[in-house]
């Protein structure tokens, strides 16, 4: 009640506006003038719109492996000249740099700017905290984390989210259910802190905690190792997301994102049916490489973290150094992934930025006017 009260102005205005948007009730009627029965086309469209950005259930592995389902749709690609796609492009006389913009993301969402990566070190400590900590907050943190993940799954876990969609007030007004993953990282970090506290608190018997540490490391590291070694054997790396594409007769049909991309390539290469397939095969091979490289990366981080905590428990390493190593590992883990999406290429000097905005002659004339009158630009008026 307190939480709702503090946000009443935002919640109420959203509720008022929603009735005027495509999230409101439809005013369409049947030819006889009576409201149509069952789920109307407008209601189905509203449902599809609300659940468009639903995280895939298996896509949750991105919490541990950032490029588990490829990178973002056009960002953070890190595709070099040695990639399969770049080599295919070079053989076709296309600049290899264009390989950066290919659809390497193959998850359940229409597109995305990047994965929801929680950090493999943070996830390791969170699982350890859930098992080793005696703080009752762990159950609240763990339960909330599971709850938020299930909401992020959206239509992919319809048995749960349909109940919320139809019966929880304002739940149907979500733009993207994956926004709950922004909250998830806070709860998982809380569990990780409980794990650190259980291990490093004064008087802790770290040797008794080693079995739980091994179990945590085995689960997190083992999952990463499976995909590092067997990823290409158990997956085909074809897109699981779907979109609409024009079909014969002016109608549209539902196809996966790879099929839609293949259709775009076919229209560019005309009668050459082999080249689009070559490009798509190369993209899928690069997807597999991206997943495998990041899986090995996560395995390495887990191994070093477990080794550092083991060294502390055996008094081979002072606890302060052990805590410093864990902190540095977590920072390096998250920072290196962050740099894929926000780096030096996203910034320019102030002079370069300002040079892109040059004033026109009329704008300079306006600036000479010291009055308080506003200026109307009639050049943009459309004449009928």
Image (spheres, rainbow, N blue to C red):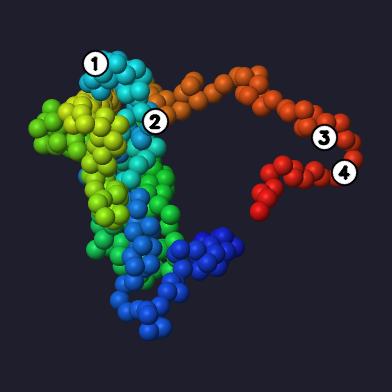
Task: Calculate the distance from the C-alpha at mark 3 to the C-alpha at mark 4.
Answer: 11 Å
Q: Residue at x 38, y 53 (%)?
A: 177
Q: Quadrant of residue 356?
A: top right
Query: Badge 2, how many Cα within 10 Å: few under 14, some, many 20+?
Result: some
Q: Which sits in the foreground, 159 or 135?
A: 159
Between marks 2 and 3 in the image, the one whose residue lies nearer the viewer: 3
Between marks 1 and 4 in the image, the one whose residue lies nearer the viewer: 1
Q: Which sits in the foreground, 370 or 172?
A: 370
Earlier in the chain: of badge 3 and badge 4, it is 3
Q: Is residue 98 visible?
A: yes
Q: Residue at x 54, y 64 (%)?
A: 17
Earlier in the chain: of badge 4 and badge 2, it is 2
- Residue beneath label 1, please? 91
Query: Badge 4, how many Cα within 10 Å: few under 14, some, many 20+?
Result: few
SS for tag 2? loop
SS for tag 4? loop
The residue sitting at the front extreme is 384
Q: Quadrant of residue 281?
A: top left
Earlier in the chain: of badge 1 and badge 3, it is 1
Task: Calculate the distance from the C-alpha at mark 1 to the C-alpha at mark 4.
Answer: 62 Å
- Residue beneath label 3, please? 366
The answer to whether residue 30 is left or right of residue 269 is: right
Up-down relation of residue 381 to residue 106 (above or below): below
The residue sitting at the left extreme is 233
Between marks 4 and 2 in the image, the one whose residue lies nearer the viewer: 4
- Residue beneath label 2, please? 75
Using the image, tell me which numbered label, if any, was put on residue 372.
Answer: 4
Task: Calculate the distance from the C-alpha at mark 2 to the C-alpha at mark 3.
Answer: 40 Å
The answer to whether residue 179 is left or right of residue 155 is: right
């Amino acid at each position: 009640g307190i939480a709702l009260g503090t946000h009443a102005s935002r919640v109420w205005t959203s509720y008022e506006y929603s009735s005027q948007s495509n999230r409101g009730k439809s005013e369409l009627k049947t030819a006889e003038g009576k409201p149509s029965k069952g789920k109307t086309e407008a209601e189905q469209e509203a449902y599809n719109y609300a659940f468009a950005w639903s995280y895939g259930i298996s896509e949750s592995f991105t919490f541990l492996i950032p490029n588990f389902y490829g990178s973002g749709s056009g960002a953070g690609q890190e595709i070099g000249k040695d990639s399969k796609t770049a080599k295919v492009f070079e053989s076709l006389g296309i600049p290899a740099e264009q390989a950066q913009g290919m659809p390497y993301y193959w998850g359940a969402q229409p597109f995305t700017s990047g994965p929801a990566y929680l950090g493999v070190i943070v996830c390791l400590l969170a699982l350890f905290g859930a098992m080793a900590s005696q703080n009752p907050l762990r159950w609240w943190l763990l339960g909330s984390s599971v709850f938020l993940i299930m909401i992020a799954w959206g239509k992919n876990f319809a048995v749960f989210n349909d109940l919320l969609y139809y019966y929880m007030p304002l739940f149907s007004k979500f733009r993207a259910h994956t926004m709950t993953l922004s909250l998830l990282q806070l709860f998982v970090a809380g569990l990780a802190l409980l794990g650190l506290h259980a291990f490093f608190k004064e008087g802790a018997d770290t040797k008794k905690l080693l079995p739980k540490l091994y179990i945590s490391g085995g689960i997190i590291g083992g999952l990463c190792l499976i995909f590092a070694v067997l990823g290409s054997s158990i997956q085909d790396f074809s897109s699981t997301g779907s979109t609409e594409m024009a079909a014969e007769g002016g109608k549209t049909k539902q196809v996966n994102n790879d099929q839609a991309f293949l259709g775009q390539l076919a229209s560019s290469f005309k009668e050459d049916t082999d080249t689009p397939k070559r490009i798509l095969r190369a993209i899928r091979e690069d997807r597999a490489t991206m997943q495998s490289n990041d899986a090995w990366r996560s395995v390495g981080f887990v191994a070093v973290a477990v080794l550092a905590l083991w060294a502390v428990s055996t008094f081979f390493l002072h606890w302060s150094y052990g805590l410093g190593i864990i902190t540095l590992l977590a920072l390096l883990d998250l920072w290196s992934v962050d740099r894929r999406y926000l780096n030096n290429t996203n910034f320019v000097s102030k002079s370069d930025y300002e040079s892109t905005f040059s004033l026109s002659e009329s704008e300079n004339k306006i600036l000479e006017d010291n009055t308080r009158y506003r200026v109307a630009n009639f050049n943009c008026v459309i004449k009928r």
